[in-house]
Amino acid sequence: MSARPSEAERSRLEALQRYAVLDTPAEQAFDDIARLASLICGTPVAQINFIDATRQWSKASVGAPRGELSRRSGLCIRAILQRDPLVVPDVAADESFAARAPAVGDPAVRFYAGAPIVTADGHALGTVCVFDHQPRSLTAEQTGALAAMARLVMSELELRRLRSARRDDVGDDAARERGESFRRLASAANEGITIIIDDRIVEANNAFGQLFGYEVAEVVGRTPLDFVAPESRDAATQHVTVSSERPYEARGKRKNGTTFDIEVIMKSIPYKGRTALGCVVRDITERKEIDRLKNEFVSIVSHELRTPLTSIRGSLGLMEGGAVGELPPKAHDLVRIARQNADRLIRLINDILDLEKIESGKVQLRITSLDPVELVDSTIAELGAMALQYKVTLTSLVTRRDPITGDRDRVIQVLTNLLSNAVKFSPEGGVVTVAATDGPPGFLRVAITDEGPGITEEQKAQLFVRFQQLEQANTRRRGGTGLGLAISRSLVEQQGGRIGVDSAPGRGSTFWFELPLVPAARTGEEPSAPNADVERPAVLVVEDDPAVARVLGIMLGRHGHEVVMAGTLDQARRILARSRPSAILLDMGLPDGSGLDLLDHLIGTAGLELVPVIVLSGEGPQADHRNSRVSEWLTKPFTERELLRAISGAIGEPEPERWHTRP
Amino acid sequence: MRLLCVDDEEDIRSILALALGLDPELEIELVDSGEAALVRAPAGRFDAILLDGMMPGLDGYETCRRLKADPATAAIPVVFLTARTQRAEVDRALALGAVACLMKPFDPMTLAGELRTALGW
């Protein structure tokens, strides 16, 4: 640590001491605020952190374990230097944060926002902060709510200090203060917020009343279904039953009977000593309209631009090809130029649409097991004509046949992109090689090496960003759209991998990507984790499709979860007889019955009642009484992030003893 | 080989006539709508149908569904020639019984060859 804190820092540390909050146990009031922060900001992780001379210490944490970090490695240290919330949309892209991010304890932290907790005399003690595993942003309302929550934490601290000074009996007061806390916090939010117990609304904020055209007093005591249009009631009922944390869309119904589009997030929260449903409602009329316009635009681009281009490209192609007679040489040249540029425009439209689709998560990946030798060989074969044209030799040095996981078409798209770039930038007579080597544990690295001009360090940072070509002149000479590497990066990342480049000017470049290897099958084995010295037992994956099971295993393994696989209900029951997993991922359609049957088994077996179950299904939940046993319902296809959010939501419940290994 | 080409755009029909006309073995008949295709298909002894996806009135998908539902035309192989080439659209066409989806814009000099490959001719 630095030798001596400054005067200002000493005075801040004294202030922190006065509130006597450091190293105290978790408390519900703070947990509630963190939970609301996570709910309102829609992030998987929310924390209330305090910073003393050496540490960043968590008073409350949702979606991640409560703990401490060295003060320098935490992200909050910068947030307390300013009075407004600090929002870092992409930690990896932020110079002063990027170096710290790996120390956060979760290398996947990409988004950070923190509002400082500031005393009346101006000392910032810590933050209310939210994290996400992917870059994002907050609305002004969410940022405002985060700041309101920081103020709320401060008033909680003040209350505590006063109370301990007065040595008051705090029983009733605490509950009242907490109710007051909720109302103050909720009144600051723009979203409708309610708390539901036993299918009745017990609290609602003003925004909720306004949204639906009621006075708040009229809202309390009603059933939530009064606010849902008839066509959405079934879906709403199912979501209430399974308490899905994932936002869902429905039609809301106002007091005057008109209906409108809403988005609802539900989450179990502790409330006055009971379990209640916290519910946040947003009016998404505007968003739906924007979505509709965007889809319409994409469809226009896709069809209305391609149709005239079909005629242009067709006419030029027929003329250039001599289908309507020989052209004079100069005319032939001009027609060729026009045809090449029509092709370029077509590629650009295709790439823009592709990137839009990939980045909005609309691409459905078909993950299977792939043979690297075959992938590389067939891609090289496809590019043979191009290599010949550029007088470049394409060679595969790939001999490893360890299967990797990915979507065949999409992996070939990435390979094609990297290989055709390598060809375009190679000197005449150059050689492009493809090799496969060990990546990080569990990954295969495929590397494409060229003898081209190489890339400087500064250029590397720009490479994978859309429309970034190193020299504008290259666009025309090399015929690229400037989107290929951005598309490749999105595709590789969506398949659980990484992409990058090693290069120096004058020494050629090696572009590489890493994809998960198919792990050795462990089907039906005893989970290795459940023993006394391992804190978290394994996750049981009940899934009969081996490719899907492997991908789930990879996703979970990369985030530190031990995994045990069962391909049938029978195997799952046998594994459960020997050990208790930390959570169960359950496919619905299994060879020997429905996943719902396993829920019966869990309900009826002592010791397994509380194991959280996450259902993986091709469809949304069907009405079934056993759904109440489900912690989360993930509809296939789901992203890695959704899966991890579901798992940490399920495992990271506030009562940690529930999920510990059976003694 | 008799081929029925269905496309609502007159320009594209002209280009199709020229492009496919490069293959001397192909005999082409052009119609401008799904409705017209349903009228001509049962009567024309076609060996294959090349169908645009997006058309006003009956679109290519609905036209294909009706062709496959009619015993008189169900056996004629259908190839889509469409500007909508997203995987979901291709899947939709194949699910309706099409044998392949070719992409617009196309290269007129190689279209006949691609069509033959798709049809296994």
Image (cartoon, coloured by chain):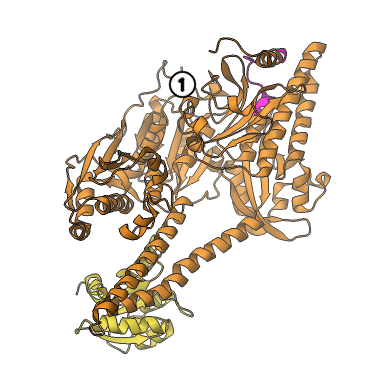
- Looking at the image, can residue B3 be seen? yes
Q: Picture coordinates of residue A138 (x, y %)?
A: 61, 42
Q: Nearer the viewer, residue A571 or A42?
A: A42
Chain A's colour? orange
Question: Vertical placement of A483 versus A113: above or below?
Answer: below
Q: Picture coordinates of residue B100 (x, y %)?
A: 30, 69
Question: Vertical placement of A137 versus A483: above or below?
Answer: above
User: Taking A309 as reference, is A125 left or right?
Assistant: right
* A197 in the magenta segment: no
Q: Label 1: few (<14), some or many (≥20) within 10 Å?
A: many
Question: In the figure, the yellow chain has which letter?
Answer: B
Q: Image point 30% across, 36% down: which residue? A: A443
Q: Nearer the viewer, residue B102 or A645?
A: B102
User: Residue under circle 1?
Assistant: A661
* A22 in the magenta segment: yes
Subunit that carries the residue with mark 1: A
Farthest front residue? A330
- Looking at the image, can residue A272 be seen? no
Q: Picture coordinates of residue B121 (x, y %)?
A: 19, 75
Q: Picture coordinates of residue A464 (x, y %)?
A: 40, 46
> What segment carries the magenta color?
A16-32
Q: Nearer the viewer, residue A49 or B99?
A: A49
